[in-house]
Amino acid sequence: MQIPLVDYLVLGDEPYLQANECTNCGARFFGRRNACAHCGHREFKPVRVSDTGTLRTFSIVYRAAPTIPTPYVSAIVLTDDGTSVRSNLINIEPDPAKITLGMKVKLDTYVVGTDDDGQEAVAFGYAPV
Amino acid sequence: MAQDIWVLGTHMTAFGRYPDQDAVDLATTAALGALDDGGVTISDMDLLSCGTLFQANAGMGQQVQKQIGQTGIPVYNVSNACATGATALRTVIMAIRAGEADMGLAIGVEQMGKMGLLAGGTRKEKNVYEPSGRYGAVMPIDGILGTDTMPGVFAQAGMEYANDNDGVGFEQFAKVAQKNHAHSTLNPLAQYQKEFSLEEVMGSPMQSYPNTLLMCCPTGDGAAACVLVGEERFATLSREQQSRAVKISASVLTTDPYVESGAMQPDVNTLTRNAAQTAYEQAGVSPEDLSLVELHDCFATAELIHYDNLGLCEPGGAGDFIDRGAPWRDGDTPVNVSGGLISKGHPIGATGVANVYEVATHLRGEAGDRQIEGANVGLAHVIGLGSSCGVHILEKSGIS
């Protein structure tokens, strides 16, 4: 039994991210919406976000709350269909020499924890292509 | 156009750690100092605005009144992240412009102690996963889906600039911190007053690449205050008061307008650019006219991108700007000659008032060893994540 870390991660054979897209201006958002931050419109439709993109910016985080494993690579990815996504870079050494701004990355998922009922939480990250 | 507003009196405590004083003590010291500096008393004040972030619900303004004079005037307690101090100033400015007050007192104060890392949740896994919150998350996402920590968020803001512009990298960011630490050695009010080499800055413990420990501002305690007066009342003051007063030629507060990536990575650029543009128009000055700038260097990566956002350098030229020493105290546009948040310190609520104190003190020619000679126009900038940006442009009195 698996559950996504966040509700905008859709699990399945090919996991993907699902955004709420404003039906008026096309702005995309993750998570529950009340209205559009861009145009104020109140209707949205779910859209599948491209699972490939480029690395827009990153930081290698060494200092975090005590229970969070460090170092890890925090990143903002710009997907090929123009949506910004916040996540970690995975399957890469946390070394600035190995990380290149603009590098191609692809969505991937992994199990991030298991609860007392044996339910697995599945997170996503972006790995170098 | 609304009437001109002047800083009549101003004062700040040294920033640092005050285990034997509380925030009320610090705020009171700043308030009384500003009143004395302006040659006025609490009885002259028509309103009081007090900014503090971590004690936002403590009625800090009223607590200060209990120490310095309960005259029954309106008090506005304000909180606006790291722009809290600028917001306290603007509250008084707006009241004077609205005609509801002739003179008012703005205070910013914070007592943080050693809070350590700000933001970024601890990860406490539930025994049974249940989606909650706006993202239906089954556990806190900090550290799994990127970072919430301040050194990391501002690192990413800097690396985004590096992505878009040539000649910007770890070394350019480090040079910013090297400069601010060097500047702070001349400021007796700074929390730290120690110089470090570029190698020491780059070699200090990495917090969030590219921000090392010496590229991050500390937590700390402190307060600052300003007495503000409108031009009608200003005209009745003594020649001495008028000649030491500093004119506020622009006062602007903005929030972050929508950008595509804003929900994922706070956009600290657009609101700063908007605030700067409006401030330059209000004041009728351009970036080249500025004798000094105090900007929001919460992290070295932040200062570098604000060179560009405030128009201090050519578009895309922030790397070259620091490489050629332009923001050093003897450069084209001295930036953070106080030591900046990185070394002067950043007691959050106090910062947006302390920046105005610093600029005003130079314009008065009273900044001692760190005086920028001939200073006649200066800019103070703060930004609070969430986001809010405050920009004030100050001018020398011109009355002798």
Image: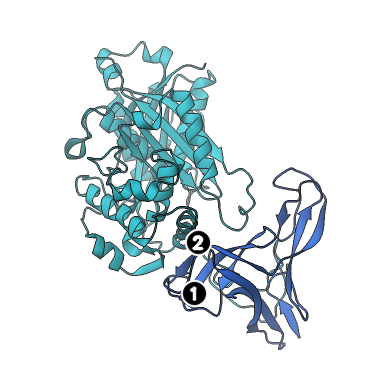
Chain colours: A blue, B cyan
| Residue carrying label 1 | A72
Residue B297 shows up from this direction: no
Left-right relation of B148 to B215: right
Q: Mark 2 and 1 residues: CB-CB less than 8 Å, in contact?
A: no
Say which of B205 and B132 sits in front: B205
Q: Is residue B239 above or below residue A46?
A: above
Location of residue B183 in the rendering, given as x and y in whole percent from the top left corner = 24, 47
Which of the labelled discs sits on residue B135, or is there none?
A: none
Say which of A80 and B346 sits in front: A80
Residue type marked 1: Tyr
Location of residue B48 in the rendering, given as x and y in whole percent from the top left corner = 45, 31
Q: Please name the residue shown 40% across and 21% down the image.
A: B229
Q: Quadrant of residue B202?
A: bottom left
| Residue carrying label 2 | B119
| Chain assignment, label 1 | A
Say which of B276 and B318 sits in front: B318
> In this rendering, which labeled residue sits more in front, label 2 or label 1?
1
Q: Counting other residues with Cα less than 10 Å from the Cα at mark 2, is it few (<14), some (14-19), or many (20 or more)? A: some
Q: Estimate the spatial distance between the alpha carbons at disc 2 and disc 1, rounded to whole Å.
A: 17 Å
Residue B31 shows up from this direction: yes
Location of residue A61 in the rendering, given as x and y in whole percent from the top left corner = 46, 69
Location of residue B111 in the rendering, given as x and y in whole percent from the top left corner = 39, 52
Q: Is residue A75 above or below residue A37?
A: below
Residue type marked 2: Ala
Q: Please name the residue shown 41% across and 28% down the image.
A: B286
| Chain assignment, label 2 | B
Residue occupying the far left of the picture: B369
Q: Secondary structure at mark 1?
A: strand
Left-right relation of B259 to A103: right
Q: Counting other residues with Cα less than 10 Å from the Cα at mark 1, is it few (<14), some (14-19), or many (20 or more)? A: many
Q: Secondary structure at mark 2?
A: loop
